[in-house]
Image: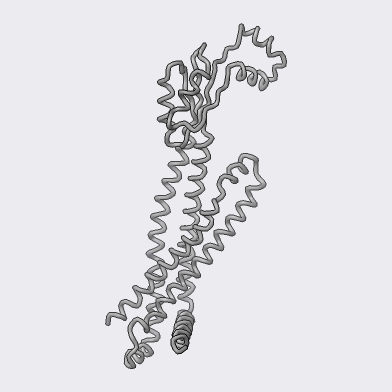
């Protein structure tokens, strides 16, 4: 029973001292929280954008088709098994020249397919294989393999869009890393200054506690908790801002064209990512707050 009372007494002391320190911090607390909020907001938005671009790349990769046009007289069914056995291939679909010719004439509005065929002295098209790659990265390699197959006349695929998105994602990651690193140092410096001013304001109280035998850990633990609180508050505000931006963009894009809505549907975060994002914000916020407070009290604790 006595141990429980002792734990409750210590917890009450730490809570009161932490809140008292934050109260004495005044406007410096808001400076620290706002700096952490900006840091975590940009951090969260960059992570989300990176995940969304990765998802868009995967979506393009799963739908990206390599069109393989065969030589005249070669049937698609003859090469289907060979192409399907390639390790880079996810799926193979055959398009006979008769099916392609019929679809082409229908798109052109030709009602008499047989008459159009006779005017051109037969079907001018060739059989085609539509090959889906397992990932965007293997498409160029797969295309080169397909070109070397006997009976293949031409291979076409749209790789530029995938490359552009991949380059954009890499550039965004490097830019975000630089900005977040600078803002992290700024946030740590602001929190360090805030906690240090609070420690200096309570210098006489700390000296009294040292004289009565209080340990260094017990004296400075409330200040460390203050840094953690600043980081947590900044993380919560940043997550609220990110959630607000997500809702605003979702409502805005829902009124756009079907293609934009298609992209929006595939830019949504997975359940795992939706859980990991706030946890990442909280982790970075706590780390920044903890480092700032440790740097602040270290100077006084070592004396």
From what the image shows, is residue 289 above or below residue 217? above
From what the image shows, is residue 166 above or below residue 146? below
**Is residue 146 at least partly visible in the picture?**
yes
From what the image shows, is residue 59 above or below residue 303? above
Residue 100: image location, x then y, percent: 60, 19
Rendered residue at 42%/45% (across/down)? 170
As rendered, which of 243 and 38 lies closer to the eye? Answer: 243
Q: In the image, 292: left or right of 44?
A: left
As rendered, which of 96 and 185 lies closer to the eye? Answer: 96
**Is residue 24 at least partly visible in the picture?**
no
Rendered residue at 37%/78% (across/down)? 196
Q: In the image, 120: left or right of 168?
A: right
Q: Quadrant of residue 190?
A: bottom left
Farthest residue, direction left: 303
Rendered residue at 52%/23% (across/down)? 129
Looking at the picture, the colour scheme in use is one colour
The C terminus appears in which quarter of the rendering?
Answer: bottom left
Residue 88: image location, x then y, percent: 44, 32
From what the image shows, is residue 52 above or below residue 259? below
Number of numbered labels in the structure image:
0
Rendered residue at 53%/21% (across/down)? 128
Residue 210: image location, x then y, percent: 33, 89
Q: Quadrant of residue 7?
A: bottom left
Residue 200: image location, x then y, percent: 37, 83
Farthest residue, direction front: 1
């Amino acid at each position: 029973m006595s141990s429980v009372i002792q734990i409750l007494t210590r917890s009450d002391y730490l809570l009161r001292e932490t809140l008292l320190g934050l109260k004495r911090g005044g406007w410096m607390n808001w400076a620290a929280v706002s700096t952490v909020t900006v840091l975590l907001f940009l951090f969260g938005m960059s992570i989300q954008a990176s995940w969304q671009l990765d998802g868009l790349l995967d979506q393009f990769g799963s739908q990206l088709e390599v069109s393989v046009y065969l030589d005249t007289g070669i049937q698609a069914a003859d090469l289907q098994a060979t192409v399907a056995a390639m390790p880079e291939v996810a799926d193979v679909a055959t398009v006979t020249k008769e099916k392609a010719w019929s679809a082409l004439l229908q798109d052109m509005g030709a009602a008499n397919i047989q008459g159009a065929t006779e005017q051109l002295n037969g079907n001018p098209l060739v059989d085609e294989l539509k090959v889906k790659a397992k990932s965007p990265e293997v498409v160029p390699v797969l295309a080169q393999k397909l070109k070397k197959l006997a009976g293949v006349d031409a291979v076409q695929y749209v790789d530029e869009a995938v490359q552009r998105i991949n380059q954009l994602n890499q550039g965004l990651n490097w830019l975000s890393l630089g900005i977040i690193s600078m803002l992290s140092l700024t946030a740590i410096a602001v929190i360090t200054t805030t906690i240090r001013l609070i420690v200096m304001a309570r210098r006489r109280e700390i000296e009294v506690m040292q004289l009565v035998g209080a340990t260094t850990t017990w004296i400075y633990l409330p200040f460390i908790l203050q840094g953690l609180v600043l980081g947590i508050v900044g993380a919560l505000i940043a997550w609220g801002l990110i959630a607000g931006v997500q809702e605003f963009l979702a409502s805005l894009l829902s009124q756009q064209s079907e293609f934009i809505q298609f992209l929006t549907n595939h830019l949504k975060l997975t359940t795992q990512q939706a859980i990991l994002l706030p946890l990442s914000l909280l982790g970075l916020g706590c780390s920044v707050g903890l480092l700032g407070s440790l740097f602040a009290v270290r100077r006084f604790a070592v004396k």
